[in-house]
Image: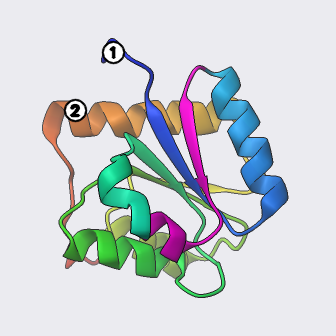
Amino acid sequence: MLGRSLTIAVVDDEEDVRHALHRLLRSAGFEVLVYASGNEFLRHAKDSAPDCVVLDLHMPGLSGFDVQDVLNERQLPFPIVVLTGNDTAEGRRRALNGGADAYLCKPVDDESLISAILGAVEQHATSGPTQDPGAVQ
């Protein structure tokens, strides 16, 4: 698609999840950056400029929602695939309205995650981000 490996940032406080996602995404041909917290990711977000962010919603410190808010404030419209173990209608609505391109629940099927990442990257490449943080459905 881009003639180079896509770089995916994985932001999740659970070490086992980070490790598993790192292995999966590397085996799928992606370059992978892993971050144990929202703060850690945000310190490096602009310089690392990932092609997509796989973002956990419920983390100590800054939540995934907080990370989305900061990315929006900084005008860093990275494609975002939310991956959560705590699925609620309100969480889904808030994540998607905050700019997430996909919302998946843990445990996630490998192919579904890879498909969501590629879809998010493709959507941003062809039409730009579809952020409308004020939209409520």
| Earlier-in-chain disc, 1 versus 2 | 1
Describe the colour scheme in one phrase. Answer: rainbow
Q: Which mark is residue 72?
A: none
Residue depicted at x 57% and y 38%: 32
**Residue 137, image x, y percentages:** 31, 74
**Residue 31, image x, y percentages:** 54, 31
Q: Is residue 88 visible?
A: yes
Q: What range of the chain is rendered magenta?
A: 29-42
Q: Amino acid at mark 2?
A: Ala
Residue at numbered disc 2: 125
Quadrant for the N terminus in the image: top left
Residue at numbered disc 1: 1
**In the image, residue 33 lies in the stretch drawn in magenta:** yes
**Residue 43, image x, y percentages:** 41, 69
Quarter assignment of residue 136: bottom left
Which of the pair 27/65 is nearer the observer? 27
Residue depicted at x 52% and y 84%: 62
Residue 98 horizontal side relative to residue 29, left or right: left
Q: Tell me if label 1 and label 2 are in contact, CB under 8 Å.
A: yes
Judge whether 53 appears above or below 30 on screen.
below
- CA gap between label 1 and label 2 equals 10 Å
Q: Amino acid at mark 1?
A: Met
Judge whether 10 appears above or below 91 on screen.
above
Query: Label 2: how many residues lie within 10 Å, few (<14), some (14-19) or many (20+)?
Result: some
> How many callouts does the rendering have?
2
**Residue 38, image x, y percentages:** 52, 73
